[in-house]
Structures are given as C-alpha cells and as structure tokens.
Image: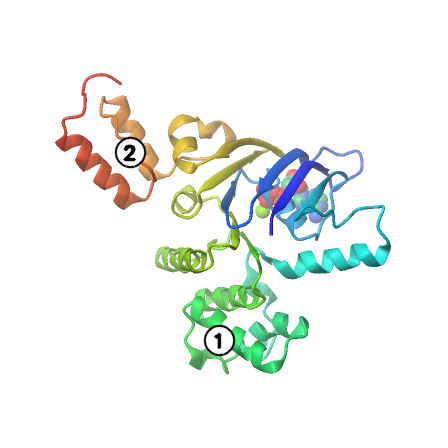
Amino acid sequence: MSLRLEKVFFRYDDGGPWVLEAVDLEIPKGSSVGIAGGTGSGKTTLLMHLNGLLQPQKGRILVDGEDPHDPSLSRQERAARRRRLRSHVGLVFQYPENQLFEETVEKDIAFGPKNLGLPPEEVAARVERAMAALGLSPDLKTRSPFQLSGGQMRRVAVAGVLAMEPEVLVLDEPTAGLDPLGRQEFLELLRRWKREHPKRTIVYVSHRMDEMALLVERLIVLHRGKVVADGPPVHLFLEEDVTRWGLEPPPAAQLLLGLKARGLAVDVKSLAPREVARAIARAWRDGAPCGKA
Ligand SMILES: Nc1ncnc2c1ncn2[C@@H]1O[C@H](COP(=O)(O)OP(=O)(O)O)[C@@H](O)[C@H]1O
Ligand SMILES: [Mg+2]
C-alpha cells in the first residue's frame, strides 16, 4: 500500500495556526520512514491522517491512488475506503498499554482480528504469530495484561496491532518510558519484523535520533507543521544542521562530525555504531588525510 499526501493543511481550531501546512509526502510501499521534529511540530497529527482518523482540511491524501475522503463519492463509498484504510494502516499510539482492556492477553490481542470478521482458527494463528514477533512467551496468553510489567504490557498492545497484519505499521514514540534494554530489544523486534515483511511499510516517530539512525532508511523532519528535510539519516545528520529544528544528532554522528573537524574524514553508509566503529578503524589504518577539515 502506498500513501501520498498532497499539500495537506490541517488545524484544530478555526482561524488558529496551521498545525500541518502544505505537507507533501510520498510513502512508497515497503519503505521504512522516520518522522522527527520537536514537541508540537505536528508529528502525531500527521500520523492520524495516515489511517484516516483525521482528514485534511485542504489538500488530500491518496491511498494506492484513491482519496478516502473524495467528496464526489457517495457516503457509503467513502466509508468503505476509510474502513479499508483503517484495517490496513495499523496505528500504535503513544503509551498504547493505556488502551488494554480485556481480561486476558490472548483476548486483547485477538480483539482487532476478531473485529475483522476472521474465522477463529485464523484469529488464534495471528495471535500466536504476533506474540512470537514481539518476543512474548505463549504462556502469557491466559494472564491478565494488567499483571504484566510495563514493557510486557507495551508489547501486548503492539501485538494487538500486528495481529491485524497491517500493510503499514505506524508507531508514535513506541519506546517512550522503556528502559535502555527494553528499548533496544523492542527496536530489534521491529527490525526483524521489517526484514521478514519487506513489502510492508514502517512509519516511525521518535525523538530519539539514535533509534532513527538504526531503524529507518529515510527521515522526514517536521518543523512547525512543515516538512523541512527529507533524506537518508546519514545524510541529514552529517550534512545538515539539525539543531535548528530542535533535534540533536545521534552520538555516532556527533563523533563523526568531531573527527571531521579534527581532520579525519570518515565515510559511512549508516550510523549504526558497529558500522561507524569499523569505518573509523579503516580510515585510521589507511592514514586518512589529517590536518584539514
Ligand atoms: N486535540 C487537539 N486540540 C487542539 N490542539 C491540538 C490537539 N492536538 C494537538 N494540538 C496542537 O497541535 C500542534 C501539534 O501537535 P502534535 O501533532 O501532537 O505534535 P507532536 O506530536 O509533534 O508533538 C501542537 O501545537 C498541539 O498543541
Ligand atoms: Mg506526538
């Protein structure tokens, strides 16, 4: 499923400032895209347009070339397109564990697929796959989600979205409040999910630029509701001054910028710490030109 935003404008209050302003964006099928920006830059508002929870006030959104809000369609046709959008774009809200409500983990994860009208065997199979994808042991199925640790509750909530088998998985600050190990594990699970489903899309919002550098191939920066940058994280963090948009380059990028300023130019393809370490070692061994920035 491909998503396209064309000159999208949105504001919560009539006459107030635009929260999204002329946002043009194409998210092709199979991509992994990060959306970064300071607090209040419009990230959550943008995500809510991707699955039809909010509707552009000007401009339009196209889903595989179709506008789910097209005013020339009948009410029923629009509703059908929006249903399709909602079932194919899985949105994981911030602190999704706040929305758990069933008595057992299994029932909670099954809620979405059941609502899709799938047969019980298919629902059960999806629950198992989603739990495995999130590293949740099967014996948690019969537990109450409210007896689990915070990190486990978060994973159960995400499993509920994965069990819908969305073509586009949208996550809003999914690691907020997790401890460093929990965050790392969660990121690794997402990376695995993406590897195993190359045709599905991830849209990832985080204020952690180190996570972006590890997870996404393309980073979009929102600043006061406008798209101000769009490109590979390596390029953005090494070639642009991202601090003007309230962002801090990840530590690996800061290290490379520091080395460059001291005359050691290091060529990297990614900002994964291991890759950066290898590239620095190579540059050092090869006696990269020193003394000039
Ligand atoms: N429900 C709402 N009602 C009114 N204003 C809102 C609402 N949600 C967000 N806003 C405002 O819209 C702007 C963008 O918010 P948001 O999309 O949540 O940004 P971000 O996710 O980047 O922090 C902010 O100025 C915020 O105060
Ligand atoms: Mg937000």
- Asked whether residue 131 appears in the rendered view, the answer is yes
- Residue that appears at 27% across and 39% down: 276
Residue 265: percent from the left, percent from the top? 25, 26
Secondary structure of residue under mark 1: helix
Question: Badge 2 is on which residue?
Answer: 255
Residue nearer the viewer, 173 or 284: 284
Position above or below: 104 against 163: below
Q: Is residue 187 left or right of residue 67?
A: left
CB at disc 2 and ligand 1 closer than 8 Å: no
**Rendering coords of residue 84 (x, y %):** 69, 59
Task: Give the left or right position of residue 10, taking residue 30 as reference.
Answer: right
Task: Give the residue at x 67% y 58%.
Answer: 86
> What secondary structure is marked by label 2?
helix
Q: Name the quadrant containing residue 83.
A: bottom right
Q: Amino acid at mark 1?
A: Glu
**Disc 2 from disc 1: Cα separation:** 42 Å
The residue at the point 60 percent across, 76 percent down is 102
> Which circle marks residue 128 in the picture?
1
